Amino acid sequence: MFTARAIEHDDKASLYQELTAQLTGLLSDERDAIANAANTAALLFTSLPDLNWAGFYFLRSPTELVLGPFQGRPACVRIAVGRGVCGTAVERRQTMLVADVHAFADHIACDAASRSELVVPLIRNGDVFGVIDLDSPLVSRFDLEDQRGIEAIADIYVKASDKL
């Protein structure tokens, strides 16, 4: 049985090292993509400071993301590929690190309190099938260390989970 441990850290590198170790343990005996997304979102939301939303969107057609498991306030249910930070991450097939969402021309404001966002695409066998999305009420909450850490989290999730 998995037991979450409080994450003591002096720096982000050690925080993400512990977080990836915990996620690996949490997902080690489960292959269900939805269950794993739910537990991943919960672990991220409860372990990372200064978040107001952590969750998943999954491609349900070539042109649309649909809300998956998350922690935080109710969210937008459907996002077109190419729209907002999440849809742009899918379209570009790359992580989007947005210091101030109000400066992002096509930001979709699901929660008016969100000020910065980090979105990492989920890629299996060369195909994007969704994203991990983190929002913060702080401008410039996320940096390159967060990006590397959440990209590692995304990799663990993809490897641990069966295809949706």
Image (cartoon, rainbow, N blue to C red):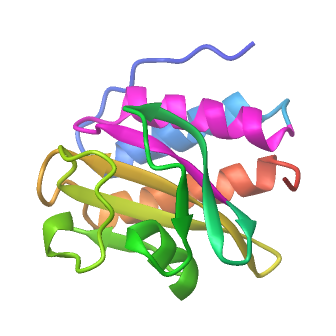
Q: Position of residue 109 (x, y in %)?
A: 28, 56
> In this orientation, which residue lies closer to the viewer: 35 or 11?
35
Residue 129 in which image quadrant: bottom right
Residue found at the very far bottom of the displayed protein: 92
Q: Answer yes or no: is residue 30 visible.
A: yes
Vertical position of residue 93 compared to residue 48: above or below: below
In the rendered image, residue 42 lying in the magenta stretch gets the answer yes
Q: Residue at x 25, y 64 (%)?
A: 143
Q: Residue at x 29, y 34 (%)?
A: 9
In the rendered image, residue 21 lying in the magenta stretch gets the answer no
| In-image side of 132 versus 139 (left or right) | right
> Which quadrant of the figure contains the N terminus?
top right
Q: Position of residue 31 (x, y in %)?
A: 87, 39
Q: Answer yes or no: is residue 93 visible.
A: no
Q: Residue at x 77, y 82 (%)?
A: 126
Residue 105 in which image quadrant: bottom left
Q: Position of residue 139 (x, y in %)?
A: 11, 57
Q: Residue at x 79, y 44 (%)?
A: 33
Q: Position of residue 82 (x, y in %)?
A: 49, 81
> In this orientation, which residue lies closer to the viewer: 118 or 58?
58
Q: How many marks?
A: 0
Vertical position of residue 140 compared to residue 8: above or below: below
Vertical position of residue 33 compared to residue 92: above or below: above
| In-image side of 152 versus 64 (left or right) | left
| In-image side of 22 versus 113 (left or right) | right
Residue 106 in which image quadrant: bottom left
Residue range highlighted in magenta: 31-58
Vertical position of residue 82 compared to residue 131: above or below: below
| In-image side of 61 versus 92 (left or right) | right
